[in-house]
């Protein structure tokens, strides 16, 4: 089985086509200022007069696109402020749930680029040792273990400057079938662990002149909820609220610390093994490498950011504005409350692998 989840099944040649791909193509062509201004220049090269209707329309379009891009830049500047200076040779990156999936991918990229990376997880790293990455066995739901490992990281690697809260588990049961132990485990891993790591690692960042970056991995499920994900949705809603509140506090008290909120849709990782998206065109499964690229770009630039993938995740907050009747219709069309019926999960996929001669299945933290 591939290291970051099962291969994406493609029923036909057009299966990779999605609304996200179309938007990406349009954004780099028809809706890009450079391309937009080429059109009137081409008309002028054909000796078309400036007052000709095609010339006026193309200039108006290019002006609108250019003003839109300028407005987006101003919006980001107001929302996130100026970036901090990032020097990877001086950064110490802590990633929770980094032994597999998205966390492992980010860890390996930064390790190969010369950064100092510490991975915290209850399971061994899927790929064994990775260059530049130091593994620490740690259950992030235990604040005493987090404090102990933080002291070891400080001693071995230096003061952490980047914290990526990525640890997560999915149980995938209806609320009436969840035991109290499972509820506590889910909320501890998906929500309380963020408080523990932030309380442990943030003080050192606050004291550092160079500041730091906090990355929070949440989910669109925290906004819309879903059947068989009551515990997970509640935790992710809390994580998003925690991040926004923390960002507001840090802007006032420690403006040299940047915050990045990641809100993906369904990721192609073992965490959601078996879940099938009802529409690959409107709601494509997100590949970890695509999310990792956005997260790494935000960290490298030293800026705060709000990352949401795929396209619908960027507009998911508008769902709450819809009348409740339309919300019900949208849920049925999207299949959000039936998608978990085929859920196998990381433990289930490991068990299947064990039956084929692999190792015994276990539930591991991390996307």
Image (spheres, grey):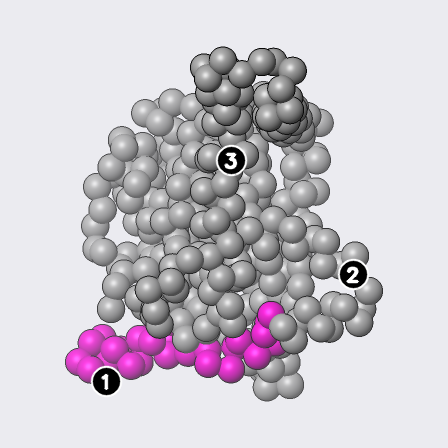
- Quarter of the image where the N terminus is located: bottom left
3 vs 2, front mark: 3
Q: In this rendering, which labeled residue sits more in front, label 1 or label 2?
A: 2
State which quadrant residue 338 falls in: bottom right
- Nearest-to-viewer mark from 1 and 3: 3
What is the span of residues highlighted in magenta in the rendered image?
A: 334-363
Q: Earlier in the sequence, mark 3 or mark 2?
A: 3
Residue that numbered label 1 is attached to: 355
Q: Nearer the viewer, residue 55 or 222?
A: 55
State the residue position of label 3: 30
Query: Are the residues at dot 1 and dot 2 in contact (C-beta closer than 8 Å)?
Result: no
Marks 3/2: CA–CA distance: 30 Å
- State the SS at label 3: loop
Most foreground residue, 54 or 65: 54
Name the mark on residue 322. Answer: 2
Extreme residue toward the right, this view: 323
Residue 296: percent from left, percent from top: 41, 37
Above or below — where is 316 with respect to 186?
A: above
Task: Compute the Cα span from label 1 to label 2.
Answer: 47 Å
Front in this rendered view, residue 86 or 7: 7
Question: Dot 2: within a 10 Å radius of its alpha carbon, few (fewer than 14), some, or many (20 or more) residues?
Answer: few
């Amino acid at each position: 089985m591939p290291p970051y989840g099962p291969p994406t099944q493609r029923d036909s040649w057009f299966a990779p086509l999605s609304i996200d791909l179309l938007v990406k193509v349009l954004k780099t062509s028809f809706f890009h200022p450079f391309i937009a201004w080429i059109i009137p220049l081409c008309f002028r090269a054909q000796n078309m007069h400036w007052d000709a209707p095609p010339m006026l329309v193309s200039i108006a379009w290019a002006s609108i696109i250019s003003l839109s891009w300028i407005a987006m830049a101003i919006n980001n500047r107001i929302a996130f402020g100026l970036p901090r200076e990032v020097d990877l040779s001086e950064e110490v990156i802590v990633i929770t749930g980094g032994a597999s999936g998205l966390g492992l991918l980010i860890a390996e990229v930064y390790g190969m680029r010369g950064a100092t990376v510490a991975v915290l997880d209850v399971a061994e790293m899927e790929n064994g040792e990775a260059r530049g990455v130091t593994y620490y066995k740690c259950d992030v739901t235990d604040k005493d273990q987090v404090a102990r490992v933080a002291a070891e990281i400080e001693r071995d690697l230096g003061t952490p400057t980047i914290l990526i809260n990525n640890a997560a588990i999915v149980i995938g049961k209806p609320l009436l079938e969840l035991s109290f132990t499972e509820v506590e485990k889910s909320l501890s891993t998906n929500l309380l662990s963020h408080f523990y790591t932030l309380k442990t690692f943030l003080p050192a960042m606050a004291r550092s002149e160079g500041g730091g970056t906090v990355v929070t991995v949440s989910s669109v499920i925290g906004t819309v909820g879903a059947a068989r994900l009551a515990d997970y949705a509640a935790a992710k809603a809390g994580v998003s609220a925690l991040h926004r509140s923390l960002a507001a506090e840090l802007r006032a008290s420690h403006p040299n610390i940047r915050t990045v909120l990641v809100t993906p849709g369904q990721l192609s990782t073992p965490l959601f093994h078996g879940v099938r998206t009802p529409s690959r065109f409107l709601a494509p499964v997100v590949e970890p490498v695509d999310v990792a690229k956005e997260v790494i770009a935000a960290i490298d630039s030293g800026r705060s950011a709000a990352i949401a993938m795929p396209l619908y995740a960027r507009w998911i907050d508008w769902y709450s504005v819809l009348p409740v009747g339309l919300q019900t219709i949208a849920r049925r069309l999207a299949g959000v409350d039936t998608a978990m019926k085929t859920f196998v999960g990381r433990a289930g996929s490991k068990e299947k692998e064990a039956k084929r001669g692999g190792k015994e299945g276990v539930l591991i933290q991390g996307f």
